[in-house]
Structures are given as structure tokens and as C-alpha cells.
Image: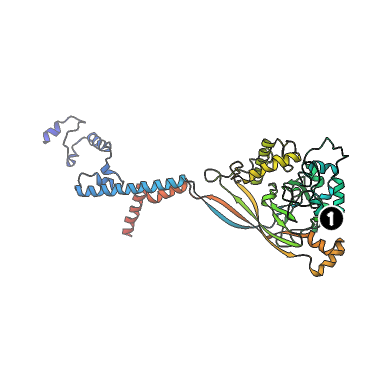
């Protein structure tokens, strides 16, 4: 463009082909519009900050170099997607891990201790009415209500005469109001704690039957120490070791055991008591979770409290403890099992057993023998498909270590004979000592934790993929350091 053409150009117009050196003769509005046009240009892949992609799409590079960048970019992208999908699948598998920790405490709540005599019914407390209705169930009578012939060989002469007279129903008029194997029936015929408990001490202080609550299980009438029910305060301990827990001496009264002529559901070959240590919120399930204590021994039970926490779905399969049932306010495995067994027996036999909750009528001895006990045995032998009890999300249990020593010793036998007015043979066959205590004043927490969460997934991605701004700041820092 000549000088004359530039002079003849109208004011505000923008002639084409204006070079930068001619900017002094170009109107300012023209130069501003040129900058605006440059700013409105859309970015291309050649200008992207994504590593490799701008080299792959640049037309100025040779084909071989662009092919190399193409291969490198998509290989890296494939590896990134493969790793990301692996992390995502791991997240969707809802993994978990377990954390075990030992905690110390200045004071611990003492557990509930439930004990049952292995013999459910005292033989000499049977009345003629009891024998008439329950004799066949107990294995003492035949189906026609006549005494079993083998009992004459098993019983001593004096007991045989008493039983022969008791089993004579020729002039007997049975009552019409028999309520079945009810709580009242088992409460009256079961072993009484006042007769069994010879001594009781807790943390060195005297205790007695008033510190125990009555509870009914498959063993009949049982007793629970430190139940925390019926307004009883929850007992605690501030020390571990023997002498800082419960120590009781019991007389199991083997003379009151039912005579055994064969194997029945209600007879037992064992002599002693069954014991279960559990939390106060959990009903005893002593027929499966209890341990035996034999007469003639002092048994030491060192226990440690464990507090377990499980995760709900989808990380686990636990159930919250506050979601109780119709029979129990707090959910536990024992409560679930008793609840399930109760519903099963009521549905199949139209009655309930003595240890079962609810308003259903108690089973008669005939229903016990013909329906309830076979049905319960069948339910126990199943694979667990009927009673599916999930683990509670919060659970307290107690580990146990048992040891025992023989009692009485030769030096203490004479003293115990005079103290209890019993022979040494009777003491060896009937008396036991149970000592339950904390091994140490600590408890173990076992907690199921989430092993991988969304925050972990994002953090793992951040380690692999960095934003362009982060890379730019890193380069600037490096360049500044070159001048220092």
C-alpha cells in the first residue's frame, strides 16, 4: 500500500495486509479489533496442555514422531483406564479389615454368670400328681402309668418302697387343672439355690441368694448372678485376679437326681452344674454355650471382656442391636435363636416349652415327648437354613481360661465334714467351688473397618493424574531455581 492510499483511507477503516511496522498509521480501532479477532480463535488440540496429545495432533511434526506419540498416548490411556477400573472394582467389592486393640480401664462391669444344675427335677420332691402326669416324660413310668421294672434294681430298698407307694394310682383321682410343664412346675421341682449355695463372696464381701435372679432354660430352673434386672445394681470390679470376682461353693445334691434307666431327653449322665458367662443384655443359651463344672474340684475361670464391632451391609451382614424382637428388646445371637425356636415349636406343636417366651400355653408332658423335643432336636440338627441369625453390629463376649484343683484336701476334709455335717464321700461327690474373675483390668476391642472408600479412590487417582496447573507451577519453580 502506497503512502497516498493510506492517506486516502477513510477514518476508522481497517485496510487489509497491515504490517506491524505500519501500526503508526493504522487507526487505533483497527489494531484493537485485530487483537480481539485473535482472542476469539478457538483452541486446537495442538495447543492443549495434555501431554502427548498436542504432539500427536501437530501437523508440523513428522509422521513417525506423531505415530510414536499416538502409540504412547493410547498405551498410557489404556493403562490408566485399566488401573482405574481395577481400583473402582476394588471399591465396589466393599473390602474391610479388622483392627484389634487392647484397652485398659479403671473399672469394669462384671459379667452375668448363669448356672444350672444338670438335674432338672428333684426326685424326692415329686408328688403323686406330678408322677401321674409327668412320670412317662421323665422316664419313670411306662405309657400305661406303671412303674418301670428296672427301677426296682436301681433304687435302694427304702427309696424303692417310697416310689412304689407313690406310683400306685389305683385309688388316685387325678386333678383336672394340670397346667403342663409350666414355670410353676419347674420352679417347685427344680433345685433351690437356698439349698445348693453353701457360701458366696464377691470381691471379698458376703453375698447370698438375694444376689441371684431366677431364669428358666432347657435345664429347667437356673440362677443368674449380676443380672442387672428387677432394679438390681450392676456390679463392677476395680481389680483383676482371684479374690476380686465371684467365688461360690455349691452342693449339687446328687441324692436328688432322677434315677437313670436309659437314655431320655430329660435325664443326664453328668453330675455338676452348667455355667455360662455372658453380658446382661443377652439371654442365656446355656445348653450350647455353657461349660461344665464338676463336683470335687475348685474351678478357676479367668475371663477377658471383648467388645466387637461389625459393619452393616454392604461391608458385612450384621444387624443393629437396638432392633430387637417381640420377645427381647436387644438383638443378640442367643435372643434370635430362642425367638426362632419358640416360633418353630408354637407353629408345629401349638405350645411352648418352659424356657420359651410368649403367651402360648405350656406344653403338656405328652406334647413335650411326642412333638416339642423331637421338633427341637430336628431343628438343631438342621444346617441352619431355618434359624438364620446374623451377627449383631455391637457385641460383648467373654473369653475364658479354665483351671481346676481337687477338693477337699486331706487336711481340710475333716474340717468340712464338721462344718457341713456331711461325710467326706458326700463332699467329694457333691460339693464344688467356682471362682470367676477378670484376668486383668483390660478389655479387647475388635473392630471391623472399611478398607477402601471414595476418598481413597480419589487420592489414588490424584497420585497418577495431575492437573495442568500443578505441572505449570512445578516448572516455574524449577526455572526460578536455575537463577538462584
Q: Quadrant of residue 417?
A: bottom right
Kindly tell me whether residue 51 is visible in this rendering.
Answer: no
Residue with the mark numbered 1: 156
Residue at point 64%, 51% (across, down): 396
Locate the C terminus by quadrant.
Answer: bottom left
Q: Residues within 10 Å of mark 1 (few under 14, many from 20)?
A: few
Apparent side of residue 89 relative to residue 402 in the rendered image (left or right): left
Compared with 130, 405 (above or below) is below
Image coloring type: rainbow
Compared with 301, 356 (above or below) is above
In the image, 444 versus 247, the foreground residue is 247
Find residue 311 and report its horizontal and vertical position in percent. 56, 46
Q: Quadrant of residue 402?
A: bottom right
In the image, 57 versus 429, the foreground residue is 429
Apparent side of residue 39 relative to residue 141 in the rendered image (left or right): left
Secondary structure of the residue carrying numbered label 1: loop
Find residue 130 and report its horizontal and vertical position in percent. 82, 43
Find residue 235 and report its horizontal and vertical position in percent. 74, 53
In the image, 338 versus 137, the foreground residue is 137
Locate the N terminus by quadrant.
Answer: top left
Find residue 453 and report its horizontal and vertical position in percent. 48, 47
Q: Quadrant of residue 400?
A: bottom right
Kindly tell me whether residue 76 is visible in this rendering.
Answer: yes
Amino acid at each position: 500500500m502506497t503512502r497516498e492510499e493510506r492517506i486516502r483511507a477513510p477514518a476508522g477503516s481497517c485496510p487489509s495486509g497491515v504490517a506491524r511496522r505500519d501500526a503508526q498509521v493504522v487507526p487505533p480501532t483497527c489494531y484493537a479489533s485485530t487483537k480481539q479477532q485473535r482472542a476469539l480463535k478457538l483452541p486446537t488440540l495442538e495447543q492443549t496442555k495434555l501431554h502427548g496429545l498436542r504432539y500427536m495432533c501437530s501437523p508440523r511434526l513428522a509422521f513417525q514422531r506423531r505415530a510414536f506419540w499416538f502409540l504412547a498416548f493410547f498405551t498410557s490411556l489404556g493403562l490408566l483406564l485399566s488401573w482405574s477400573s481395577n481400583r473402582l472394582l476394588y471399591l465396589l467389592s466393599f473390602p474391610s479389615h479388622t483392627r484389634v486393640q487392647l484397652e485398659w480401664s479403671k473399672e469394669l462391669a462384671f459379667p452375668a454368670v448363669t448356672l444350672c444344675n444338670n438335674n432338672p427335677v428333684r426326685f424326692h420332691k415329686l408328688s403323686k400328681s406330678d408322677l401321674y402326669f409327668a412320670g412317662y416324660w421323665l422316664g419313670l413310668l411306662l405309657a400305661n402309668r406303671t412303674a418301670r421294672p428296672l427301677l426296682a434294681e436301681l433304687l435302694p430298698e427304702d427309696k424303692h418302697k417310697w416310689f412304689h407307694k407313690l406310683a400306685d394310682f389305683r385309688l388316685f383321682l387325678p386333678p383336672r387343672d394340670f397346667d403342663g410343664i409350666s414355670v410353676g412346675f419347674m420352679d417347685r421341682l427344680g433345685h433351690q439355690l437356698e439349698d445348693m449355695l453353701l457360701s458366696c463372696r464377691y470381691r471379698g464381701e458376703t453375698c447370698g441368694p438375694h444376689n441371684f435372679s431366677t431364669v428358666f432354660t432347657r435345664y429347667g430352673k437356673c440362677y443368674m448372678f449380676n443380672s442387672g434386672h428387677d432394679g438390681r445394681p450392676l456390679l463392677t470390679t476395680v481389680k483383676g485376679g482371684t479374690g476380686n470376682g465371684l467365688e461360690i461353693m455349691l452342693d449339687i445334691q446328687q441324692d436328688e437326681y432322677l434315677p437313670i434307666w436309659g437314655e431320655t431327653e430329660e435325664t443326664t449322665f453328668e453330675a455338676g452344674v452348667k455355667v455360662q458367662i455372658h453380658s446382661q443384655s443377652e439371654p442365656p443359651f446355656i445348653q450350647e454355650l455353657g461349660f461344665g463344672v464338676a463336683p470335687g474340684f475348685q474351678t478357676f475361670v479367668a475371663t477377658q471382656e471383648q467388645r466387637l464391632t461389625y459393619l452393616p451391609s454392604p461391608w458385612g451382614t450384621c444387624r443393629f442391636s437396638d432392633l430387637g424382637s417381640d420377645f427381647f428388646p436387644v438383638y443378640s445371637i442367643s435372643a434370635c435363636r430362642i425367638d426362632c425356636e419358640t416360633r418353630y415349636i408354637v407353629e408345629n406343636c401349638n405350645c411352648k416349652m418352659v424356657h420359651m417366651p410368649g403367651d402360648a400355653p405350656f406344653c403338656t408332658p405328652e406334647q413335650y415327648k411326642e412333638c416339642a423335643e423331637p421338633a427341637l432336636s430336628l431343628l438343631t440338627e438342621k444346617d441352619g437354613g431355618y434359624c438364620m441369625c446374623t451377627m449383631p453390629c455391637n457385641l460383648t463376649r467373654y473369653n475364658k481360661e479354665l483351671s481346676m484343683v481337687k477338693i477337699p484336701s486331706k487336711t481340710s476334709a475333716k474340717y468340712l465334714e464338721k462344718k457341713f455335717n456331711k461325710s467326706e464321700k458326700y463332699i467329694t461327690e457333691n460339693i464344688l467351688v467356682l471362682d470367676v474373675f477378670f484376668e486383668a483390668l483390660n478389655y479387647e476391642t475388635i473392630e471391623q473397618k472399611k478398607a477402601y472408600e471414595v476418598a481413597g479412590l480419589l487420592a489414588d487417582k490424584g497420585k497418577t493424574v495431575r492437573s495442568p496447573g500443578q505441572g505449570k507451577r512445578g516448572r516455574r519453580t524449577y526455572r526460578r531455581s536455575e537463577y538462584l
